[in-house]
Image (tube, rainbow, N blue to C red):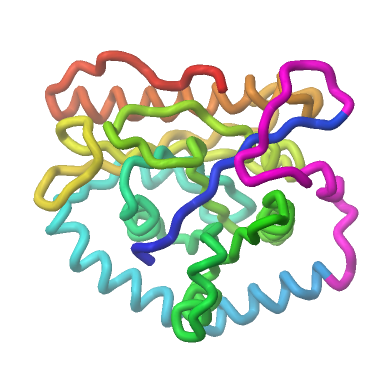
Amino acid sequence: MGRYILCGFSYRVPGRRGTPYPARLGQGLASLPAPRTVSKERSEDVAKKKRECKRKMWLYALGQFLLVLFYYPVFRMRVRGRENIPRTGPLLVCCNHAAKRDPVMLGVSMRRQVFYMAKEELFRGRFLGGLLRKLGAFPVLRGSGGADALQEAYDLLDDNAVVGVFIEGTRSKTGELGRPKTGAALLAYRTKAPVVPVCITAEDGKPPRVFKRTTVKFGRPIPFEALEMPDDSSMQLRKASRKIMSEIAALRAESLEEFGIQPEGAGEGEN
């Protein structure tokens, strides 16, 4: 679990006016089907994946239990706002990204299983690749423009699962928040799933490290309607992404204040 890397990406609708918006994972996102047009074969694949994950829930639960025993004392973790996580239904969990261990911290902070996007390279080994798939991870294929991973995420959300996304798309070396990518906003638009913002904050505002107090703070769910996206133009996607990022920034400021640090400012500038 410690090697999971959640992917952020940008998106631009072909034919729409506006500044070209480069896709972090490449081109091809426009090929994604509109909601409710998923093929029968694809739906069967997702249902099979969910059945396999349910059969292996003991493995996920065991791994989570063991990681809790390690991470909570070593990183002095505390979780705030866990009651804000809906118990059922599709859910997008959008988190900041400051350290490689962030996906694990996010996973051990939630009771519901989180499905992650992970680098294709991690699936090449028979053992690790099989383990990742059994734990619900799915690969981002190089050269696909991220379309396959987005389709997988869409299908999972359509099946009432939880999908985790690092909205910045890359790690912050300083711990400060970066600029949001628009992939999460696109998924929200396509699936109408609510978004739960979450921020992982270390006591000094820098990336989490061992024996340094760390807070994982979940915000209230953001209904799709509150994102105010009448369409999926690049302008609307950027606007919604900034709104999600502003909620994450507010959570970070609250956590820093609890640590006795006055935040210098948010990092949710426009991409």
Give residue 213's position: percent from left, percent from top: 14, 43
**Residue 226 visible in this rendered orientation of the protein:** no
> Image quadrant for the C terminus?
top right
When the figure is inspected, residue 44 is found, relative to residue 2, above or below; the finding is below
Q: Is residue 245 left or right of residue 68?
A: right
Instruction: Please report the residue visible at 19 percent of the width from the left and 68 percent of the height from the top.
Output: 69
Residue 69 inside the magenta-drawn segment = no
Q: Main secondary structure of the magenta part?
A: loop
Q: Is residue 136 left or right of residue 61?
A: right
Instruction: Please report the residue visible at 45 percent of the width from the left and 78 percent of the height from the top.
Output: 128
Image quadrant of residue 225? Answer: top right
**Residue 227 visible in this rendered orientation of the protein:** yes
When the figure is inspected, residue 213 is found, relative to residue 162, above or below; the finding is above
Q: Nearer the viewer, residue 148 or 52?
A: 148
When the figure is inspected, residue 53 is found, relative to residue 218, above or below; the finding is below
Q: Is residue 60 left or right of residue 29?
A: left
Image quadrant of residue 252? Answer: top left
All told, the count of numbered labels is 0
- Residue with the most extreme left position: 211
Q: Which residues are magenta?
A: 15-41
Q: Nearer the viewer, residue 31 or 42?
A: 31
Give residue 120's position: percent from left, percent from top: 56, 65
Give residue 161's position: percent from left, percent from top: 61, 59
> Image quadrant for the N terminus?
bottom left
Instruction: Please report the residue visible at 66 percent of the width from the left and 75 percent of the height from the top.
Output: 49
Q: Nearer the viewer, residue 96 or 16?
A: 16
When the figure is inspected, residue 257 is found, relative to residue 90, above or below; the finding is above
Residue 32 inside the magenta-drawn segment = yes
